[in-house]
Amino acid sequence: MTSEFLDRVLAMLGDPPQEHADPAAWSRLETELGFSLPEDYKVIVDAYAPVKLNHHLYLDHPATDRWNLAAGIRKGSEAWAQVPWDDDVEGDPRIVLGLDEMEFGTRRGLTPIASADSGQTVFLAHKDSRDLLFVEDGDGEFFAYSMSFSEWLFRYLIGEDMSGPHSSFFYPGPVVLESRPMQPGDPVIRRQGPDRAM
């Protein structure tokens, strides 16, 4: 686990509520997927999800009925599998992953693990026994990031281009965390991480 960036993310987001941490839920999800998810990703999700970060980025949790990560991965994988793939995909993940046909929700292919209301989808992939990320920019172009999820998230939150060129969303001041309502009509609880010098 890349502890440097995980520590930076946790410091930026502040004291975690950890309302839904449940090792059994991760075990069920990983059994369904057939592979393990990155430890730093699980730590962040357990600490804060279901949550919307800085007005755009959504993280779901495997232990909740609503905003359930397993259901989201399943639904997202099914939807992406319906997208026709031709030879003109910009940043085609098949080339990087050595695939003839694109797969979703499998160890060989792409697994959707986060999304943004601005259209982006963050995918986990595996290459040569290591994890990497692909981000689809909402317009059909894919960008590969050879880094941990915590490094990607840290760089996203400090306003770097993490879903292609000119894609940054930087908000000065503390990171804003918005709870996802567990029942229809539940209020959204908004809080801020610690002050940061940016």
Image: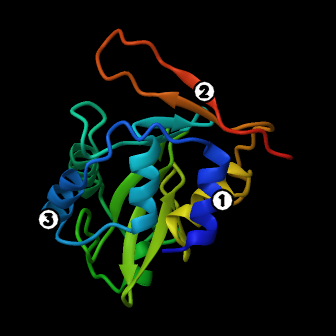
Within 10 Å of disc 1 (Cα), the crowding (few <14, some 14-19, many 20+) is some
The mark nearer the N terminus, 3 or 1, is 1
Indicate the amino acid at tag 1: Arg
Residue occupied by mark 1: 8
Is 24 drawn above or below residue 31 in the view shown? above
Counting residues from the N terminus, which is met first, the one under dot 2 or under dot 1?
Answer: 1
From the viewer's perspective, is residue 147 above or below residue 30? below
Disc 3 and disc 2: Cα gap in Å?
Answer: 34 Å
Residue 74's place in the image compared with 51, above or below, is: below
Kindly state the secondary structure of the residue where label 3 is placed.
helix
Residue at position x 32%, y 46% in the image: 21
Query: For residue 31, which numbered disc appears in the image?
Result: 3
Identity of the residue drawn at 57% across and 23% down: 190
Secondary element at tag 2: strand
**Residue name at image x 19 percent, y 57 percent:** 29
**Do the residues under discs 3 and 2 have CB atoms within 8 angstroms?**
no
Q: Which residue is mark 2?
A: 191
Compared to residue 129, the image places residue 115 above or below, namely above
Mark closer to the observer (3, 1): 1
x and y percentages locating residue 122 in the rendered image: 46, 56
Q: Identity of the amino acid at label 2?
A: Arg
- Give the CA distance from mark 2 to mark 1: 18 Å
Image location (x, y in percent) of residue 43 = 43, 57
Mark 3 residue type: Thr
